[in-house]
């Protein structure tokens, strides 16, 4: 079972939700940059390229960073460096780090990346957006886009009216911060935000994706979590949806995924992100089948062969 301490590290759900709804994220947080992009053409996450310029692993810090290749309306390729700063405390050298990453991208790939930051902390006064130095013969002024999630506290009505998935993401994030010592209020808000997804008429896929984010960040004590599940189960039954108890299935599937991934890593060693995504995309039935099959695995090749034999479930 995932502990609260592990789940407080919210970089994983942010990475997941950014990948699932990247165009919507750009339109929601950075509309001016989004307006430059031809969203009819596919965007590409440059994970390998980002790893070549990142050194955060050496520093023991983890960030929800994404380097993304997109196409401008005029037909030119541009790269976007999206950084989600989830640290609870402001970081003195944050602007310098943003500049350093931008410089490394240019140095390594000859690409002038657009640098953008989403700040999730609780300090209203911390708003880094530039890095500069100035000498008689040399000067530099580097600016980057910054969004402060706390600012949306004063735009709550706007969030409620929005059907952009990131309105729900921001609402869940803010209410998680505001209810850190009020579990009863958090339970009520968690239920309200999930119910809102149904009221907006989101398809099941979107409800599942957004539920996963909300459930991950809005942690409840065990007793209240049980009450929440019961309330939510009754709610879904009342709506007579075609996917009754979606929430229960998501919770169960996530638990199964965590168990299978841990067992796989013990059997065949560390898994790449690509392989992890393939496992996470499996249907519940095949996930359970993999849980049995892995007992006979002795190397990573066994897992890859098994996944190759189940192509339909790993294409989503």
Image (cartoon, helix red, strand yellow):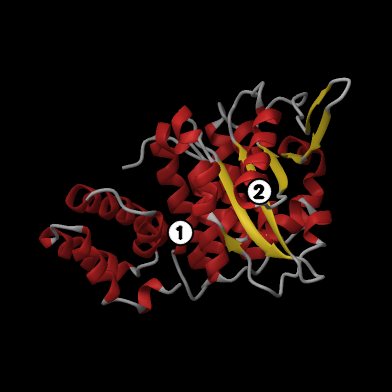
Residue 252 vertical placement versus 282 (above, below): above
What's the mark number on residue 261?
none
The residue depicted at 33 percent of the width and 56 percent of the height is 257
Q: How many marks?
A: 2
Instruction: Give how far across and how far down residue 173 sits, in percent.
Output: 62, 41
Q: Give the class, few, some or many, for how many residues have Cα within 10 Å of label 1's Cα (few <14, many ≥20).
A: many
Mark closer to the observer (2, 1): 2
Element under label 2?
A: strand
Label 2, label 1: how many angstroms apart (C-alpha)? 33 Å
Residue 229 vertical placement versus 39 (above, below): above
Q: Give the class, few, some or many, for how many residues have Cα within 10 Å of label 2's Cα (few <14, many ≥20).
A: many
Q: Which of the two residues, 27 or 206, is positioned nearer the viewer here?
A: 27
Q: Which of the two residues, 76 or 221, is positioned nearer the viewer here?
A: 76
Residue 87 vertical placement versus 154 (above, below): above
**Which residue corresponds to mark 2?**
81
97 vs 151, left or right, is left
The residue depicted at 62 percent of the width and 23 percent of the height is 89
Which corner quadrant holds the N terminus? Answer: top left
Which corner quadrant holds the C terminus? Answer: bottom left
Name which quarter of the figure residue 115 lies in. Answer: top right
The residue depicted at 35 percent of the width and 56 percent of the height is 252
Q: Which of the two residues, 158 or 26, is positioned nearer the viewer here?
A: 26
The residue depicted at 62 percent of the width and 33 percent of the height is 177
106 vs 232, left or right, is right
Instruction: Give how far across and how far down residue 285 sits, in percent.
Output: 28, 70
State the residue lying farthest toward the front: 137
What's the mark number on residue 247?
1
Name which quarter of the figure residue 122 lies in. Answer: top right
Residue 246 vertical placement versus 225 (above, below): below
Disc with the residue nearer the chain's start (2 vs 1): 2
Instruction: Give how far across and how far down residue 217 sits, in percent.
Output: 52, 42
Q: Which of the two residues, 267 or 157, is positioned nearer the viewer here?
A: 267
């Amino acid at each position: 079972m995932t502990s609260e301490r592990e789940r407080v590290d919210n970089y994983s759900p942010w990475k997941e939700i950014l990948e699932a709804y990247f165009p919507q994220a750009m339109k929601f947080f950075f509309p001016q940059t989004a307006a430059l992009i031809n969203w009819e053409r596919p965007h590409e996450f440059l994970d390998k390229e980002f790893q070549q310029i990142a050194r955060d692993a050496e520093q023991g810090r983890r960030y929800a960073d994404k380097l993304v290749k997109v196409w401008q309306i005029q037909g030119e390729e541009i790269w976007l460096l999206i950084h989600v700063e989830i640290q609870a405390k402001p970081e003195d050298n944050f602007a310098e780090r943003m500049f350093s990453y931008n410089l490394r991208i240019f140095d390594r790939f000859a690409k002038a990346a657009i640098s953008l930051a989403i700040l999730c902390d609780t300090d209203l006064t911390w708003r880094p957006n530039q890095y500069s130095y100035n000498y008689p013969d040399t000067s530099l002024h580097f600016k980057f886009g910054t969004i402060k999630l706390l600012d949306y506290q004063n735009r709550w009505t706007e969030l409620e009216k929005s059907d952009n998935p990131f309105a729900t993401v921001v609402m869940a994030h803010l209410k998680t911060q505001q209810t850190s010592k009020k579990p009863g209020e958090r339970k009520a808000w968690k239920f309200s935000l999930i119910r809102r997804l149904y009221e907006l008429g989101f398809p099941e896929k979107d409800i599942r994706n957004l539920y996963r984010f909300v459930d991950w960040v809005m942690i409840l004590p065990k007793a209240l979590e049980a009450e929440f599940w019961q309330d939510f189960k009754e709610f879904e039954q009342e709506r007579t949806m075609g996917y009754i108890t979606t929430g229960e299935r998501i919770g169960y599937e996530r638990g199964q995924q965590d168990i299978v991934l841990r067992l796989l890593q013990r059997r065949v060693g560390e898994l790449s992100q690509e392989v992890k995504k393939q496992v996470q995309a499996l249907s519940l039935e095949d996930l359970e089948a993999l849980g049995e099959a892995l007992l006979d695995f002795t190397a990573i090749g066994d897992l890859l062969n098994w996944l190759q034999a189940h192509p339909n479930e790993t294409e989503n």
